[in-house]
Image: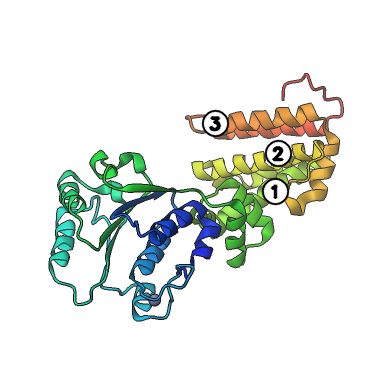
Amino acid sequence: MVYREWEDIAKEQATPARLLKNHIQLNRVNHAYIFEGEKGTKKGEIAHFFAKTLLCKNLDQDLNPCNVCKDCKRVNNDTHPNVLKIEPDGKFIKKEQVQNLIEEYSKTSLEVSPRINIIYEADKFNLSSANSLLKIMEEPGEDIYQILITENYNSLLPTIKSRAEAIHFKELDRNLIRQELKKQGIKSSYAHPISQYTSNLEAAKAIADDEEMIEIIDLVIDVYKALLTDNQSAIITFLEKNKKILVDNDKANFFIELMIIFQKDILQTKLDKEDLCFLDQKSIINKLADKIDISYAEKALKNMLELSIRTKYNINLKLALNKLLMNLERGYKHATYSSRDSI
Ligand SMILES: [Zn+2]
């Protein structure tokens, strides 16, 4: 995505937008920044926009780049000679890559214009390439800027950290993730639970594109539907489709997390709260909420949360999930249930 104005960025990353814009306004742009935050937080795109803002000579009164001049167009097309990108060549960013950069600097630029290096996965310097970079950072040319991008701020070398201003990029708002998924044609009945599961846009898109993950969302709904009626069994519903889930830890985890989200919806309903994730299943959620008392709703949720933690260890998933569903079946279907029973 190509950003065109600060306002677009502020909607997604308010703090970085405010800081960077201020630096331009006050004429105090740093020679080195570290953009750090989770995958999918738009660090690269915003670095690109920032480079465009530094290069465009026709900023408007809100400091937006004009988007029509030669500089803007070349940044937008990724062809600007003064915006150089480095990413690891294999496991590391190599010394030669940094030396190539230095060589570029030594050539006199035909146009007097800033040069911006965008360095991806900046935690992947080895010692010799880091030393080369440090030389540039210690004596930055007048108009030379480094933007280092990383998902692992703690793995950056301290010498690099101390010479740059770090800007934290927070995970995107869940509403934004829903909107992005909907733009891609994902139904809201899927976009809502996915955005509840992850606040990482890239991960959310990957799930939405994965048919098996979508099937798991359907399975969770089917399992809860089965808990409503006496002639259907949640366990049998699960067993019919569980093969794909049990062989893959990510999928098992996704299944359990979605079971948790659904159970939370039931608990919310019991507490008369409106804030539901599985909005399209409201009538089922209401009926399930009627079948149990609050203490059971809480207890079932607690057991699922514990299971979610246990899946990180080497447990027998098949057994654990069967037990969970058996207990749910008992809890939701047996009128004789007492809240003192363990589920
Ligand atoms: Zn421009």
Residue ID for mark 1: 277
User: Callout 1: 10 Å neighbours few (<14), some, many (20+)?
Assistant: many
Q: Specify the amino acid type for callout 2.
A: Lys
The residue at 77%/28% (across/down) is 296
Q: Specify the amino acid type for callout 3.
A: Ile
The residue at 34%/76% (across/down) is 71
Residue ID for mark 2: 264
At numbered mark 2, what does the secondary structure look like: helix, strand or loop? helix
Determine whether, in the image, residue 53 is placed left or right of residue 215: left
The residue at 26%/55% (across/down) is 88
At numbered mark 1, what does the secondary structure look like: helix, strand or loop? loop
Tell whether circle 1 marks a residue whose Cβ is less than 8 angstroms from ligand 1: no
Q: Specify the amino acid type for callout 1.
A: Cys
Please identify the quadrant where the C terminus is shown: top right
- Whole-angstrom CA distance, mark 1 to mark 3, is 22 Å
Determine whether, in the image, residue 53 is placed left or right of residue 295: left
Determine whether, in the image, residue 343 is placed left or right of residue 249: right
Give coordinates of residue 138: x percent, y percent.
19, 49
Residue ID for mark 3: 309
Q: Which is more N-terminal, label 3 or label 1?
A: 1
The residue at 59%/57% (across/down) is 176
**Cβ–Cβ under 8 Å for marks 1 and 2:** yes
User: Which of the 4 image quadrants contains residue 320?
Assistant: top right
Q: Is residue 310 above or below residue 241?
A: above
